[in-house]
């Protein structure tokens, strides 16, 4: 595989806060929900900005092994009896077999020190400062097999600094969003992610995790729980006190709901002077490895997966020797109110350096020899850089520091030039056989210790950062005030509207009763009037008909009854013929009258029928009116 084509830019993985269920462990104490006064906390931090320049913190860890009698440890100093070779004898040391060299350190961890102690003393304060906005770099330096990887990574049964830091972060970080909101682009900048980009990150994360599952054997994937339970069994003080008051600043900051936080990790190695991303072993997949991780367990799996991809080989000194410098970085990006220009991006680098090797001892050849040479060369450049920085500082000169001579020093240029907190854990194997390597390490540390971390640039940076916070804080405060004012105003308005609504409800209730009453009265009057009108009308029509028929009857009775009587009388007279004629005429006349009468009766009957029909129509209409009024009443009346 042509590794030279690998993109050497850093790949990141997004991390989310730990699984809340993990908090149920017996070492889990919840953060207090402390609110308030970011500015006060920050202002309290201000005097620190004015601190004197500080030397690089160098700690010594002595490996758990049979300590050679040449060493004695006395508080923060280690004394080492160095045998004098005849060639090195100066005139005034003639006849002296050995001299005792004294090396002092910020802290010395004797062989029996635990991983937890080292984390507590060296790393915990830095992680706290990291969360609060300070960058940090921690390196382990030492000869091969001296315990660097053990210190930085550790084992499942004895977890080292990185798992403890992850545990600490995921225990204390607030619940983070499901998807990353921002992504670090440069050292101090972030970019907002679009919805599609967020989705890509989630997909990349899932790919990475399934790759991790495939690569790491099953037993290995359970190591997170195992590691956790180990941590929980440790005696008090490893993680419990993290959630105490010291986190107030940070907690209070995150109580501002408009701050969004994302955590990313990257893991890379410098192998034979090439940088490889341990989270994307296949160069084809470059650019897809920025991955969001959900839980602490995922972060740990990523660490394990990265370690799996790391170059190890067996040498005569260490059967599981790291053949590269590996760098695990955690980044925390905080964005205020979604404004990428009011952001804070901090990183914490953990660098497990490959061990310096004496070729004679390692008996390396082939690949191992090439690796050894590269390891030693880059460590040499690291030494030269540190020497040069110290010299510049001592003599107040500006000699060019050869950062560019190795990938390692290029990567850590910022930290080495004093722009951010850097510390080292120097590891030595105190056995007799490794004395020479240990002395070399101790000499290196003696030089490194003298390098002064110039605080001035940090001061400026921190001031910038502080001003960002103050700006953000003021913004929050202003927004809060505005919000509070607006909320009060709205509340007043709502109260007023409620009162008005109540008043209106009462008014309309009385109005409705009144209107109902009025309509009822109105309709009732109309109804009664209509009823009365129709009744009178019908009675009048009936009466008129009755009268008319009665009149007709009387008329006919008066007109025809006498004729009949006269006719009856006249038909019994003397002159038969005349009488016959008269009778016939009378009969005819009578019949004609009768016919007329019948016709009139007929027409009267017809007329009567018509009147009846009209009556019935009127009755129908009356009924309709009645129905309509009833309907109206139904609608109107309660
Ligand atoms: N303090 C310690 N207590 C117990 N075992 C230790 C300690 N330090 C180192 N070891 C063991 O010593 C062996 C070598 O340690 P480690 O691999 O950490 O060395 P190293 O300095 O990283 O070596 P290299 O540079 O070759 O990778 C490992 O098996 C490790 O578990």
Image (cartoon, rainbow, N blue to C red):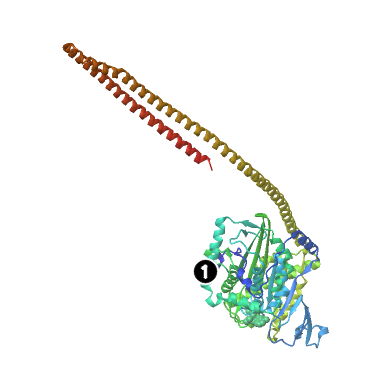
- Residue 303: give x, y in percent of width and height: 60, 71
Which residue has dot 1 on it? 210
Q: How many marks?
A: 1
Note whether 581 is above or below 223 in the view shown: above
Note whether 35 is above or below 633 in the view shown: below
Q: Secondary structure at mark 1?
A: helix
- Residue 291: give x, y in percent of width and height: 57, 64
- Residue drawn at the location 61% of the way across and 40% of the way down: 511
- Residue 142: give x, y in percent of width and height: 68, 77
Asked if residue 287 shows in the view, the reply is no
Dot 1, crowdedness within 10 Å: few (<14), some or many (≥20)? few
Q: Is residue 51 left or right of residue 295?
A: right
- Residue drawn at the location 80% of the way across and 83% of the way down: 90
Q: Is residue 526 left or right of residue 441?
A: left
- Res 360 quadrant in image: bottom right
- Res 5 quadrant in image: bottom right
Asked if residue 283 shows in the view, the reply is yes
């Amino acid at each position: 595989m042509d590794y030279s084509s690998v993109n050497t830019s850093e790949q990141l993985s997004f991390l989310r806060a730990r699984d809340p269920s993990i908090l149920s462990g017996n070492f889990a104490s919840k953060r207090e929900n402390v609110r308030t006064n970011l500015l006060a906390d920050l202002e309290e931090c201000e005097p620190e900005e004015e601190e004197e320049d500080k030397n690089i913190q160098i700690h010594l860890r002595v490996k758990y092994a049979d300590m050679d009698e040449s060493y004695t440890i006395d508080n923060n100093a280690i004394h080492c009896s160095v045998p004098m070779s005849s060639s090195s004898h100066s005139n005034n040391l003639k006849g002296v077999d050995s001299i005792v060299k004294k090396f002092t350190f910020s802290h010395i961890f004797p062989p029996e020190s635990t991983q937890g102690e080292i984390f507590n003393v060296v790393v915990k304060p830095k992680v706290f400062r990291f969360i609060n906005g300070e960058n940090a770099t921690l390196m382990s330096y030492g000869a091969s097999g001296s315990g660097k990887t053990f210190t930085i990574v550790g084992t499942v049964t004895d977890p080292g600094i990185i798992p403890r830091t992850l545990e600490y972060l995921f225990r204390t970080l607030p619940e983070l969003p499901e998807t990353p909101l921002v992504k670090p682009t440069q050292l101090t900048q972030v970019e907002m992610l679009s919805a599609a980009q967020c989705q890509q990150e989630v997909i990349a994360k899932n790919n990475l995790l399934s790759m991790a599952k495939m690569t790491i054997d099953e037993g290995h994937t359970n190591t997170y729980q195992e590691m956790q339970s180990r941590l929980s069994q440790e005696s008090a003080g490893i993680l419990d006190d993290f959630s105490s008051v010291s986190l107030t600043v940070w907690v209070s900051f995150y109580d501002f709901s408009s701050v969004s936080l994302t955590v990313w990790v990257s893991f890379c190695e410098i192998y034979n002077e090439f940088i490889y991303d341990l989270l994307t072993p296949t160069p084809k997949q470059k650019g897809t490895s920025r991955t969001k991780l959900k839980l602490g367990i995922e972060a740990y799996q990523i660490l394990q997966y990265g370690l799996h991809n790391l170059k190890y080989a067996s040498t005569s000194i260490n059967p599981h020797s790291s053949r590269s410098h590996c760098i695990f970085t955690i980044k925390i990006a905080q964005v205020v109110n979604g404004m990428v220009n009011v952001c804070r991006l901090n990183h914490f680098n953990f660098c497990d350096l490959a061990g310096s090797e004496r070729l004679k001892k390692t008996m390396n050849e082939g690949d191992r020899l090439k690796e050894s040479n590269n390891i030693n060369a880059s460590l040499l450049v690291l030494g030269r850089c540190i020497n040069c920085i110290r010299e510049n500082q001592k003599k107040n000169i500006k000699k060019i520091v050869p950062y560019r001579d190795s990938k390692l020093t290029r990567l850590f240029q910022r930290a080495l030039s004093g722009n951010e907190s850097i510390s080292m854990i120097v590891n030595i194997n105190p056995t007799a056989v490794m004395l020479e390597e240990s002395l070399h390490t101790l000499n290196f540390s003696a030089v490194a210790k003298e390098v002064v971390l110039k605080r001035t640039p940090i001061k400026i940076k921190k001031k910038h950062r502080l001003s960002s916070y103050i700006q953000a804080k003021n913004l929050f405060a202003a927004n809060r005030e505005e919000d509070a004012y607006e909320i009060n105003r709205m509340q007043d308005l709502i109260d007023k509207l409620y009162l008005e609504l109540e008043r209106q409800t009462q008014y309309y209730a009385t109005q409705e009763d009144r209107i109902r009453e009025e309509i009822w009265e109105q309709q009732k009057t109309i109804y009664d009037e209509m009823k009365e009108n129709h009744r009178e009308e019908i009675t009048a029509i009936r009466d008129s008909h009755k009268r008319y028929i009665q009149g007709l009857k009387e008329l006919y009775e008066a007109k025809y009854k006498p004729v009949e009587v006269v006719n009856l009388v006249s038909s019994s007279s003397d002159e038969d013929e005349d009488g016959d004629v008269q009778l016939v005429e009378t009969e005819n006349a009578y019949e004609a009258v009768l016919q007329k009468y019948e016709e009139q009766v007929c027409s009267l009957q017809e007329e009567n029928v018509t009147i009846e029909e009209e009556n019935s129509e009127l009755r129908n209409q009356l009924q309709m009116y009645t129905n309509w009024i009833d309907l109206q009443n139904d609608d109107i009346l309660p």
